[in-house]
Image (spheres, rainbow, N blue to C red):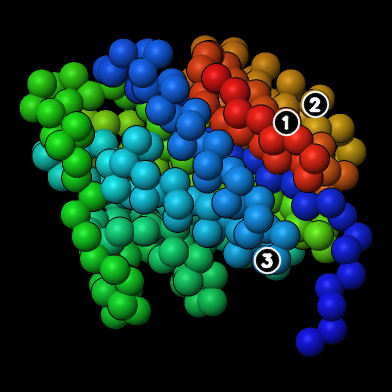
Amino acid sequence: MAAIEKIMTPKLIIHGGFYGELLPTSEIKTAKQRSLQLILEKAYAYLLEHSALETVTFTVGLLENDPLFNAGTGSQIQNDGQIRASAGIMDGTSKKFGGVINLQGIKNPILVAHRLLDFEDRVLSGQGAFTFAHEHQFEEASLETQVRRKEYEEKLAASRTSTVGCVALDSEGRLAAATSTGGKGFEIPGRVSDSATIAGNYANNDCGISCTGVGEDIVSAGVAVKAVTRVSDGMDLDQALDRTFAELAEFDGFAGAIAIDAKGNIRYRESHPQVVYGWHDGEKTKTFE
Ligand code: ASP
């Protein structure tokens, strides 16, 4: 195989959603930051050898496997005591979006969303999503942890916590975005998260964005798709995010977004503190509260 000509320094940004509100703030912050930093390093090393699409899948899979985050293992529990996970992925090059909504009993929802990119029907929900995952032999597992069960039993599970996401720009200039969530916590079964919609996760050749926050607010403001479209229409990334977050602020919407554009600019915005996130620009790596 011919060597890939490196025309871009690969860039990566990840988020671990909003901090949980139950555990002592400093404890949860430190644990999430440490985990995010380790995942960031693994993800960037992976990006050096793989495409943006492969990298966002791999990275969100690592985040799903970490029970600290509200995605995959450790997802929040809905008001009927069940966990239903959602994940979305978008390849900025092919413009294909794949997603699973309210998927139960599958360890890594993002892997199923990624697999769906090869199919005509690319967003599946509920039992249909499970049947697809089962038939394609994705690992089945309970996503419940003792911490989430305790939160549920105490009816204290904090909303606005800890979805995960990744945006990557690879050495060939391709962008991709992936997002995975256990939802808001205590939601009505059947509620649809933003994470497997273009409001919560979007990418094209110009920009990629992954969101966290209150899904209803993210959908109302169309955060990811609007900000990306604004970049495609000529705004710079800062202006596009400023405009989109100003619209969100009109109704005090609650959201955070990570973004990378085709020029390699890495950005982060949030309407309310504090999302945990980190980025790697090829030289520096940093995680933030
Ligand atoms: N956006 C997710 C949802 O509303 C939750 C989150 O980001 O924490 O389902």
- Report x, y in % for residue 219: 51, 35
Residue in front for this viewpoint, 50 or 114: 50
The alpha-carbon separation of the residues under discs 2 and 3 comes to 28 Å
Q: Does the residue labelled 2 lie within 8 Å of ligand 1?
A: no
Mark 1 crowd level (few <14, some 14–19, many ≥20, 10 Å Cα): some
Secondary structure of the residue carrying numbered label 1? strand
Q: Mark 3 points at which residue?
A: 50
- The mark nearer the N terminus, 2 or 1, is 2
Residue visible at 33% across and 71% down? 138
Q: Does the residue labelled 1 lie within 8 Å of ligand 1?
A: no
Q: From what the image shows, is residue 134 above or below residue 102? A: below
Label 1 near label 2: C-beta < 8 Å?
Answer: yes
Q: Mark 1 points at which residue?
A: 267
Q: Mark 2 points at which residue?
A: 238
Q: From what the image shows, is residue 67 above or below residue 257? A: below
Mark 3 crowd level (few <14, some 14–19, many ≥20, 10 Å Cα): some
